[in-house]
Image (spheres, helix red, strand yellow):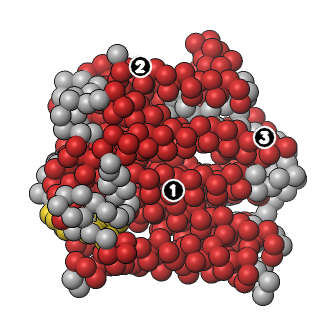
Amino acid sequence: MTQAALGSLLPLAVAAPLAGAAVAPLVARLSPRLPLLTSLVTLLGSLGLLIAVAPSVFGGQVVVHYLGGWRPVRGSALGIAVAADPFGLTFALLSAGIGAVLVLYTLSELGGLGPRELGGYAALVQLLLAGLIGAALTADTVDLFVWFEVAALASYGLTGFFLERPPALEAAFKILVLTTIAGFCVFMGAGLLYNTHGALNYGQLAQDLTGPLQSADLLALGLLLAGFATKAGLVPFHGWLADAHTAAPGPVSALFSGLMVNLGIVGITRVALQIYPAADTPVLGVLMVVGVASALAGACLALVQDDLKRLLAYDTVSQVGVITVGLASAQPAGVAGAVYHLINHALFKSLLFLCAGAIVHRTGQTLLSQMGGLARTWPGLAVAFGVGVASIAGVPPFNGYVSLGLIHSGLTDSGQYVPYALLLAAQLITIAALSRAAWLAFLKPRAEDYEHRELLRPGMQVGVGILAASCVLFGVAPSYVLEHIADPAASALLQPAQYTTAILQGAGHVMQLRTEFDYADPAELAVALSSVVLGILLARRVLRHGPPRVTDLLRRAHNGSVNDYAAYAISGLIAVVATFML
């Protein structure tokens, strides 16, 4: 298939879920489950289109399609470019593939709802996934904002899906306020760049932003990073995240944590490594500080939670911080590790949220202090949860061991030992938080049986099984994943000039960088083993004596006030902009 033919498939991969979203409420009149089945078909169709493009893209090609045939003229883009580079295509494939798994799971967990509810739910899920796929494949700043807003609007409805529950309404309002601020920042940043350079195309902007930057360029950089950091849930822009993840249904929480927050990472990566790569700014230093702060704060907040879904939500803040640290290292191993960890986070966090949703669905309990004995009653669910915990903990042979090891290598290769040490501390606390959750939910004896005891339905079993198996598969085959996915993605991010040329010429090739991962590296094995042992010891101490007092300040700062959370986000925006402008 020619490059032009491959490029023409890219808009269809976004159009398929958009069409499914329009059809879902209509087919609900025929059968309540038909909207979800239609969603599954459209997402699998989108996945098939993206898979057709994958061999060329992961082989080093950048596949480009200009909507309406408006090609660049003498280096100036006249229309919107849809482009598949290895990094963007990785996220698009994750969105379509995991989205299909989550819809399959939903058929079992929420399939008993009425036709109106399921029609609206299926439409919102497909709109959100269309926004994620569109954001991954666009090469235009305003088009990125459009997909950002499509995903945001869908997320409001999904957060408040059970609107009769007061926490859902409150959480929907919080995500509305914080994401509106974020959307304003992204739009204003793109507008400032267009006003200064007359360009929206990533490649054209990258060419213009090579010399001394104007004040408007620096202000735009701060606005864009703050906006996307809010979507990613990075500290201090993360106030919306825990409430939204807790109030939403289980598969929606998995969708938010495993996929939607990564839209923010995609935006940050495009801005820092592909639009402003040659500019003399402290952007990587800012990202390093924000990433480390997020990794530590998210882990500490997870350690003190009693609500299982809220614990997992704060761990998402921590894991997104880890990904940001890998990107900010700007080293081949670190960036490849960040891409690998983005994949892994989508897998193991979706798995853990589906397990949490299954627990709530089967027992009616949400608080860890009211759980216990689930390993004896439902051993399969315990194994799946254990796979997710071991993956995040970086235990070989699970997938987190490889991505964390690569990020560690990126930091040590560049001599950034302070962030490395802080990242290890965050990992230790993360292991403690998840070990504590595993003990309280599954291993702690429980005298009384649960009032509600429903069997795990087939769709739920298949969804959990696919994600658990993927966590193992991506852990035991690191060479394949590195060679065919992570390394090509890192190559496109670390060689922005080649990406820029491809975007403006309609096609191009990115030279492949190679990173190596030694699975049996004694140092990395020692780090993994010692982190697990110390993390379990810390979990034991917290179970016996309560959380450390150092976490009290963090807990008081997270009081649920949307005013405070908005103030944190605005303060972060001011700090980021001031760092660039002063």
The residue positioned 37% from the left and 46% from the top of the image is 194
- Evaluate if marks 1 and 2 touch, with contact meaning CB atoms under 8 Å apart: no
Question: Looking at the figure, which quarter contains the N terminus?
Answer: bottom left
- Evaluate if marks 2 and 3 touch, with contact meaning CB atoms under 8 Å apart: no
Q: Residue 55: x percent and y percent?
A: 25, 73
* On screen, residue 497 above or below 38: above
Disc nearest the viewer among 2 and 3: 2
Residue 99 visible in rendering: yes
- Which disc number belongs to residue 457? none
Q: Identify residue for label 3.
A: 170
Q: Identify residue for label 2.
A: 578
Q: Report the front residue among 197 and 204.
A: 197
Q: Amino acid at mark 1?
A: Val
Disc nearest the viewer among 1 and 3: 1
Q: Identify residue for label 1.
A: 146
Is residue 129 rendered to the left or right of residue 267? Answer: right
Q: Report the front residue among 384 and 190.
A: 190
Q: Report the front residue among 102 and 561.
A: 561
Q: Amino acid at mark 3?
A: Glu
Q: Residue 412: x percent and y percent?
A: 21, 29
Q: CA distance from mark 1 to mark 2?
A: 27 Å
* Crowding near the residue tagged with mark 1, few <14, some 14–19, many ≥20 C-alpha atoms within 10 Å: some
Q: Toward which corner of the image does residue 23 lie, by quadrant?
A: bottom right
Q: CA distance from mark 1 to mark 3?
A: 25 Å
